[in-house]
Image (cartoon, rainbow, N blue to C red):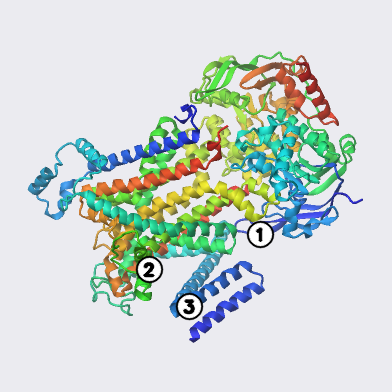
């Protein structure tokens, strides 16, 4: 038995015992389950399985630590009200916020931060990671790290544009439908129902096959397909609010619809809408990446994460992990956005319950 | 209208109505995909030819493919063909679309079925575990992990599996994966282990979260408390009071996610170079082979709509208010 | 011999988790003692938050939603329930102690037949065989006056009415012949005429089966009909505890006296000489194609109060929607000050809108939770009179003084106000428009009795000061007696009786008004028996 395996089991069993001793039943259950599973998988696959578990464990601990520090840091820096808000964030959400901010900085200052140019060929094909190329080179010998950083710029910009547009269209249509009602609502809702019944990816591929390839068309198609989801939520939320007595009171007072929407309805739906926007954004990142991966999104040589996976996928068979980096970047960003959204959604739910 | 069908159980009437709507929807979508797409700016012939589109070549190909005739006429010709099971011929190789389509559809259904067989019990089980440990550590962990799984693009999961399992651990096969005859055999199940596992991960998280929400909703209702206050043991409460009411939402969740799975197949087939309908579809999209694109689009949409329809029908049949009217 | 149930120094607590702050513990019940003999009924009474339901559930060793018992003893036949094992507690529940919930509609499993649910506990605990239990269920359905008792149990919960479900739940509790039943506000969600039937059924069933009961309610008049002892609770503490006769006839504590004196000061009816301010002439109305109002006629003189009374579904709130223009009538017209009002809201002028204001039942949802009190009351001032800044704030303070709240509340949000304060702010918002007519749609029915009393008094004082006219929509006859000058009784979309209060409330009655008046519980012993006796005589006479 190697010292690594010995240490691995010592730590796991030690932690399990501590958890049991201090009466943390759930923590004990989880830790000891991992211990037992490790024994089984150890017999199956040997030491490799333990390395995987250890790496995942260390990554999680580091992420949680980072999330904790960031939260305390923000609580320290922010004014009173905002600090209270920040304090209610779970570690996952504060870690998510930190990573979103970091990615945004990378994307905005890509020209300054990236060590090499976006399309600059600087080395051999699929060179392994060295001090010179921190993540190696890609299928044409371009620096992987630089392309990742530029890719962040493109991916985020296009996804953001698509989700803003989708949100604008969806909100406008849904609020109009809910507030005006009658046949306008009927017509809008039936059309949206039909669009909703077509699977998004299939729809996008058919439409993009018929249209010339161009980034504005891409954004427009993504937005039009996605706005159906915004429409559905927007209409539900708006109808929920429009029947509230305080909206009726405003109508009886003789207020115009603009006042009703902006002063009575919107302030009350802001949090769920922000959460929905986050959800749409993370979906747009995934959707764009998938389209690019299938060759119908952003066209080369422009760097974008989905396209980089497509470019480098053939390397996988030669054990070149180049395609995994952009994939991991997409996953990380989407996870982070979703974790923040999850917190916001839980928060609105608990506020509603708390005001009985 | 459901209310006017005298003497008929309203649930049956609703089901018939729902099925009717489903077929109308498929028809409407076929029209949208055929006519709507042609109304978009852009020219099929020019797109199809790509770089080599000289005006003469474009005119030639238009004449050859019959594109100069009005789109509505062509739609009804096409629809007539489809109703007789004929999807026309491909522009790229002038072969009948049918032959390829049905062979590849069965490959795709095989892959999706293998994935579903594993995904459904695992996700429903995990959903129940999450409900059991509601708001405690295991629930929170399942929540975070499922959140992460939802956020991962299919191709990342797929290549991760290929990299670690197929290449590093030598477990399962990497691309290309070509099923042998006969299709529905155990050896093929083993062959598609990795693509199926990718699909499982893709739908697992969604299905689990929806199951959790559905069951939680039931466990928090007043009649569960009533049963508890009658001294009914927990397992019996779940079996007699929660389960019958949970069937409808769970059927709904499963059908919705199977629909999602059929769409997720497109990307997974491309990753694993699996000869299914998704691969066929994406290849056709890349070369702008519109008859194939439209045929695959309509078939995918139809499968998706039928599964959604089944979700609704399941929910109707499990609703006591509709099955036992006043 | 020891009592059936002895509760000693019972303490119940919960942990609150405010988002962003550290969790803290609160105590809901702070040391309560009582005894219950076999076959007796104790009434627990108090306003919301008094801890009465929590105490009731403690007799089942159950805490709802994170609530837990932190101290004291609950002795059932001398044994402390709180020391039982899980299996022991399960054996007590449904065998010795049973529970009847407030909302039977939610408490029945929608996918099981009623009889299966009624006999479940009995069969489960092995008290009777299934066929014996079914027989007993049919017997109980009969005792409880359920229609077609033999086949009643074959139905699903959604196939029977709310009042019937409430009785079915009582049958479910009685079926295993328990020693004790907890009734948790079993009639609160029911209409007043149905309440009488259910109440009578419960009383008969308790007497026939000789079981003991804890009856929880906020209505002293109801509990007086059914209990042997009464415990008045407030903020988790006992205010007064004694035999029902002593509590009703010779209360010792101020709080009990206040509860008893509710709505006893009856307003003198104003002479009917003023011009009619509002008049409904032959109004029909419909939601889509479903007609809801039929030939409604009523009017209210300026400066007086018209009470519109009826049960749920009688069309009283629809009448309000017609007056405000939210639902244009399909026939007939509404006259305001002698002039016809445009039927639909958008056609009305700002001045017409200003003169009719509205106060809602649920003050919580009638105010935008994101606006401060100043914004809420100030908006009509700015909108109708163009008041701004300092001037507007000054007027808001004046209005706050009028509703007896004052300046300290001006910057608060609705969530930071109590229920009564919220309703007062809504009153101030209506007054800010200086209306001539205020429509009050059940403004006090969601409030605790004493708080409701305060709001009613405020409304009456404001009428004296400003001469405003009220249309008061309510289902509560006691409120009507206290405040109305004239009354319109509505039933199934029609006005069945209309006139000055003295005339409407004195015989000869039409059938419905008679039933309605006789169904209102009165704060005196033996009222239930007399009401039932009268009913029996009437039905015998028919």
Circle 3 chain? A
Q: Are marks 1 and 3 on the same chain?
A: no
Q: Residues within 10 Å of mark 3 (few under 14, many from 20)?
A: some
The CA span between labels 3 and 2 is 19 Å
Which is more foreground, mark 2 or mark 1? 2
Up-down: is B196 above or below C435?
below
Q: Is label 3 in contact with label 2 (beta carbons under 8 Å)?
A: no
Q: Which residue is mark 3?
A: A42
Check the image and name the residue furthest to the left: B56
Q: Is residue C4 left or right of residue B123?
A: right
**Mark 1 Cα within 10 Å, few/some/many (few <14, many 20+)?**
few
Quadrant occupied by the C terminus of chain C: top right
Marks 3 and 2: same chain?
A: no
- In-front residue for pair A25/C277: A25
CB under 8 Å between discs 2 and 1: no
Callout 2 crowding tier (Cα within 10 Å): few <14, some 14–19, many ≥20: many
The secondary structure type at the circle numbered 3 is: helix
What residue is disc 2 on?
Answer: B161
Q: Which residue is mark 1?
A: C23
Of badges 3 and 2, nearer the viewer stands 3
Q: Residue C168 at x, y = what percent? A: 70, 37
Note whether C459 is above or below C487 in the view shown.
below
Residue C483 seen by the camera: yes
Left or right of B105 on screen, residue B3: right
Residue closest to the eye, A15 or A117 = A15
Report the Cα–Cα distance between label 1 and label 3: 42 Å
Tags 1 and 3 in contact by the CB under 8 Å rule?
no
Looking at the image, which residue is at 74% across and 42% down? Answer: C175
Indicate the position of residue A101 as horizontal and vertical percent values. 43, 63
Asked which secondary structure carries label 1, the reply is loop
**Residue A140: horizontal and vertical position, in percent?**
23, 71
């Amino acid at each position: 038995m190697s010292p690594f395996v010995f240490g691995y089991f010592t730590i796991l069993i030690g932690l399990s015992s501590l958890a049991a001793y201090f009466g943390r039943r759930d923590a004990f259950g989880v830790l000891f389950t991992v211990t037992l599973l490790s024994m089984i998988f150890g017999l199956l696959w040997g030491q490799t399985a333990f390395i995987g578990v250890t790496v995942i464990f260390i990554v999680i601990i580091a992420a949680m630590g980072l999330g904790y520090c960031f939260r305390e840091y923000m609580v320290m820096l922010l004014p009173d009200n905002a600090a209270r808000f920040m304090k209610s964030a779970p570690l996952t959400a504060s870690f998510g916020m930190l990573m979103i901010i970091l990615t945004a900085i990378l994307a905005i200052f890509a020209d300054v931060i990236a060590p090499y140019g976006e399309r600059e060929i600087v080395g051999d094909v699929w060179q392994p990671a060295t001090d010179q190329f921190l993540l190696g080179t890609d299928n044409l010998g371009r620096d992987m790290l630089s392309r990742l950083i530029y890719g962040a710029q493109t991916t985020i910009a296009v996804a953001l544009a698509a989700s803003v547009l989708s949100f604008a269209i969806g909100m406008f249509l849904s609020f109009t439908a809910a507030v005006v009602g009658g046949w306008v609502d009927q017509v809008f809702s039936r059309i949206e129902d039909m669009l909703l019944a077509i699977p998004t990816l299939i729809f996008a591929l058919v439409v993009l096959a018929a249209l010339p390839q161009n980034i504005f068309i891409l954004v427009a198609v993504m937005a039009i397909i996605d706005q159906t989801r915004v429409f559905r939520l927007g209409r539900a939320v708006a109808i929920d609010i429009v029947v509230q007595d305080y909206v009726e009171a405003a109508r009886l007072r003789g207020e115009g619809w603009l006042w009703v929407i902006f002063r009575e309805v919107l302030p009350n739906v802001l949090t769920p809408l922000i959460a929905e926007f986050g959800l749409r954004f993370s979906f747009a990142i995934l959707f764009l990446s998938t389209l690019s991966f299938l060759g119908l999104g952003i066209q080369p040589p422009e760097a974008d994460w989905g396209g980089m996976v497509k470019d480098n996928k053939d390397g996988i068979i030669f054990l070149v992990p180049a395609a995994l980096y952009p994939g991991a970047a997409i996953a990380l960003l989407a996870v982070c956005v979703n974790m923040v959204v999850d917190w916001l959604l839980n928060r609105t739910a608990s506020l509603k319950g708390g005001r009985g | 209208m459901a209310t006017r069908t005298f003497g008929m159980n309203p649930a049956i009437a609703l089901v018939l109505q729902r099925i009717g709507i489903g077929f109308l929807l498929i028809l409407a979508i076929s029209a949208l995909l055929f006519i709507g797409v042609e109304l978009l700016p852009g020219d099929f012939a020019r797109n199809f030819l790509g770089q080599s589109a000289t005006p003469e070549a474009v005119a030639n190909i238009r004449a050859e493919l019959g594109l100069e005739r009005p789109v509505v006429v062509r739609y009804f010709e096409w629809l007539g063909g489809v109703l007789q099971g004929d999807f026309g011929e491909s522009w790229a190789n002038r072969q009948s679309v049918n032959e390829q389509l049905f062979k590849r559809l069965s490959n795709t259904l095989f892959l999706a079925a293998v994935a579903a067989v594993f995904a459904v019990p695992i996700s429903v089980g995990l959903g129940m575990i999450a409900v059991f440990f509601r708001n405690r550590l295991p629930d929170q962990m399942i929540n975070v992990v499922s959140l992460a799984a939802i956020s991962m693009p299919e191709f990342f999961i797929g290549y991760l599996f290929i990299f670690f399992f197929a290449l590093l651990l030598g477990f399962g096969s990497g691309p290309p994966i070509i099923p042998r005859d006969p299709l529905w055999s155990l050896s093929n199940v083993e062959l598609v282990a990795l693509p199926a596992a990718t699909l499982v991960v893709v739908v697992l998280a969604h299905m689990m979260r929806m199951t959790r929400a559905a069951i939680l909703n039931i466990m928090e209702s007043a009649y569960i408390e009533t049963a508890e206050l009658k001294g009914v043991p927990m397992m019996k409460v779940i079996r007699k009071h929660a389960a019958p009411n949970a069937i409808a939402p769970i059927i709904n969740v499963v059908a919705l996610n199977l629909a999602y799975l059929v769409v997720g197949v497109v990307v997974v087939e491309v990753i694993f170079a699996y000869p299914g309908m998704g691969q066929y579809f994406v290849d056709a999209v890349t070369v702008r082979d519109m008859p194939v694109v439209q045929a695959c689009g309509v078939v995918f949409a139809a499968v998706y709509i039928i599964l959604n329809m089944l979700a609704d029908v399941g929910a109707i049949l499990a609703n006591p208010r509709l099955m036992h009217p006043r | 011999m020891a009592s059936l149930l002895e509760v000693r120094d019972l303490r119940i607590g919960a942990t609150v988790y405010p988002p962003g702050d550290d969790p803290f513990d609160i105590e809901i019940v702070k040391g309560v003692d009582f005894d219950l003999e076999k076959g007796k009924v104790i009434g627990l009474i108090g306003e919301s938050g008094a801890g009465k339901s929590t105490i009731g559930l403690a007799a089942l060793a159950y805490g709802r939603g994170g609530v837990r018992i932190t101290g004291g003893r609950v002795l059932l036949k001398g044994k402390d329930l709180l020391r039982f094992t899980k299996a022991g507690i399960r054996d007590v529940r449904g065998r010795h102690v049973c529970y009847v919930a407030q909302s039977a509609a939610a408490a029945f499993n929608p996918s099981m037949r009623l009889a299966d649910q009624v006999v479940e506990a009995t069969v489960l605990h092995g008290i009777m065989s299934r066929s014996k239990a079914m027989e007993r269920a049919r017997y109980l359905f009969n005792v409880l006056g359920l229609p077609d008792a033999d086949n009643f149990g074959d139905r699903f919960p959604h196939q029977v009415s709310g009042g019937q479900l409430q009785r079915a739940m009582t049958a479910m509790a009685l079926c295993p012949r328990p020693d004790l039943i907890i009734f948790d506000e079993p009639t609160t969600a029911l209409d007043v005429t149905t309440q009488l039937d259910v109440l009578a059924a419960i009383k008969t069933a308790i007497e026939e089966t000789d079981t003991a009961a804890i009856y929880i309610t906020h209505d002293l008049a109801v509990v007086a009909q059914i209990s042997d002892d009464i415990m008045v609770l407030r903020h988790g503490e006992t205010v007064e505890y004694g035999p029902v006769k002593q509590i009703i006839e010779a209360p010792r504590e101020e709080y009990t006296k206040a509860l008893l004196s509710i709505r006893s000061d009856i307003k003198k009816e104003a002479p009917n000489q003023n011009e009619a301010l509002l008049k409904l002439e032959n109004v029909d109305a419909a939601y889509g194609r479903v007609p809801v109002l039929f030939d409604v006629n009523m009017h209210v003189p300026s400066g007086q109060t018209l009470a519109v009374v009826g049960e749920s579904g009688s069309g009283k709130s629809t009448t309000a929607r017609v007056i405000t223009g939210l639902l244009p009538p399909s026939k007939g017209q509404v006259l305001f000050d002698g002039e016809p009002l445009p039927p639909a809201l958008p056609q009305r002028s700002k001045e017409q809108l200003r003169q009719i204001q509205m106060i809602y039942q649920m003050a919580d949802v009638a105010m935008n939770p994101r606006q401060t009190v100043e914004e809420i009351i100030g908006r009509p001032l700015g909108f109708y009179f163009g008041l701004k800044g300092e001037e507007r704030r000054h007027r808001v303070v004046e209005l706050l003084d009028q509703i007896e709240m004052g300046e300290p509340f001006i910057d608060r949000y609705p969530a930071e106000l109590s229920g009564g304060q919220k309703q007062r702010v809504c009153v101030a918002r209506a007054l800010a428009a200086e209306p001539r007519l205020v429509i009050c749609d059940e403004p006090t029915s969601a409030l605790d009795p004493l708080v409701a009393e305060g709001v009613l008094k405020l409304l009456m004082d404001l009428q004296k000061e400003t001469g405003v006219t009220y249309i008061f929509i309510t289902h509560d006859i006691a409120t009507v007696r206290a405040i109305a000058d004239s009354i319109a009784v509505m039933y199934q979309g029609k006005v069945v009786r209309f006139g000055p209060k003295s005339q409407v409330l004195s015989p000869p009655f039409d059938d419905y008004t008679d039933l309605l008046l006789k169904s209102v519980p009165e704060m005196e012993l033996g009222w239930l028996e007399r009401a039932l006796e009268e009913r029996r005589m009437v039905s015998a006479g028919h």
